[in-house]
Image: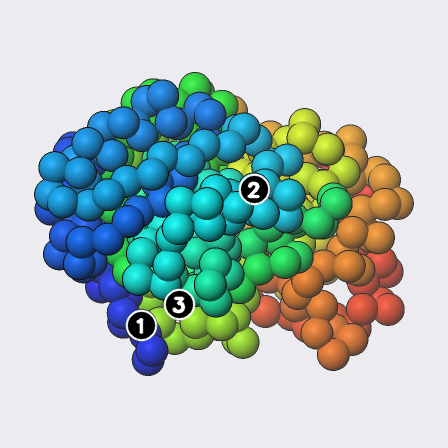
Amino acid sequence: MKIIKVELPDHSYNVEIAKGILGCTGQLVSSVWTKRKIALVSDSNVAPLYQAKVADALEAVGFTVHEYQFPAGEESKSLEVLADLARQMAADRFNRDDGVIALGGGVTGDLAGFLAATYMRGISLIQIPTSLLAQVDSSVGGKTAVDLDTTKNIIGSFYQPDLVIIDPDTLNTLKTRDLVEGYGEIVKVAALSDGDLWNLVKSIDSPEDILANAEELSIHSVQYKTDIVMGDEKEGGLRQLLNYGHTIGHAVEALADGGLRHGEAVSIGMIAMQQIFEDKGLALPGITQELRERLEAVGLPVTSDLLDSDEVFDKIKNDKKNRDGHLSLIYVHTIGGPVIKSIPSDQIQEFLDIKTVKA
């Protein structure tokens, strides 16, 4: 078992990573929580696979578990579904001494995390991510949110869990597309960090390779993100690096209206942004192609017809990362050499000549 410690000024916790660790959920939760009621939240895809198993493990050590489900999909990351879950918890008389466990992928982690952050002004939270995207990225760092209309994550909070439990064996039940989308975030981190993770990524040539190396990929990705978060919990500076690929990616994802997964959109956004900076002479030649090859090797998209849409800039201008009339753009000068470039918001469309980078 690999234990990564997330040490923050106001709240520290462990991320525990090991194959088969899901079976130890009862003991692990008992190590951080006293006996209480638990809202075990899953979507309609994950619940039939793991919810009963986790509930049984928790009840075996004395917890009282209420199993809640919501329809799978990004459209459930909404205020309406959030309110429905809160009503169920209120009906079951949950109080501030109880807790929420998010069991599932990124949508579940964001939704259940924000539920914990807001129910009675905040109750305890544990994350058990079951998708690659959630395991390597969204379950660590405390970001929780819901969407509003077509704008992602615009209503949310930073709310740290008490524990994160990562079992790479849960990836075996994912469909190929669901597995591969999470790999986009791994390539992102590898490009930012270089070192052992980039060397490992260079050896991944198929979805099967992702599964075979899932534990090591998770450990490296979580360790990098942890180091960033410990230096900048609330995204005031260094944590902005983790938005590499997300500025254009979020815009394309929104315009796709469900046609693109988050990791797929990040893949497209990363290549588009990197090509822009390479064309301007600010990034070393060839980096974009290296990234493109690593993403295409596992079947991730690296471009989209949506890049031709003028609506891309409308989405970018409304990006929540706009601050004081400027937007921070992330690229890598070389692998392992990330850069934050601040551009005035009224110059974004001129600077990001996206249509010229569409392959």
Residue 55: x, y in percent?
25, 34
Foreground mark, 1 or 2, reads: 2
Q: Tell me which numbered mark, 1 or 3, is placed earlier along the sequence.
A: 1
Q: Residues within 10 Å of mark 3 (few under 14, many from 20)?
A: many
Residue 29: x, y in percent?
19, 50
- Residue bearing mark 1: 11
Residue at x 66% of width, y 57% of height: 154
Q: CA distance from mark 1 to mark 3?
A: 12 Å
Residue 25 placement, left or right of 156? left
Quadrant containing the C terminus in the rendered view: top right
Label 2 element class: helix
Q: Is residue 288 shown to the viewer in this render?
A: no
Q: Residues within 10 Å of mark 1 (few under 14, many from 20)?
A: few
Q: Tell me which numbered mark, 3 or 2, is placed earlier along the sequence.
A: 2
Residue at x 19% of width, y 45% of height: 63
Label 3 element class: helix
Foreground mark, 3 or 2, reads: 2
Residue at x 33% of width, y 54% of height: 99
Q: Tell me which numbered mark, 1 or 2, is placed earlier along the sequence.
A: 1
Tell me the amino acid under the disc marked 3: Val
Residue 22: x, y in percent?
20, 36
Tell me the amino acid under the disc marked 2: Asp
Residue 345 figure quarter: bottom right
- Residue bearing mark 3: 229
- Residue bearing mark 2: 84
Residue 249 placement, left or right of 20? right
103 w.r.t. 3: above or below: above
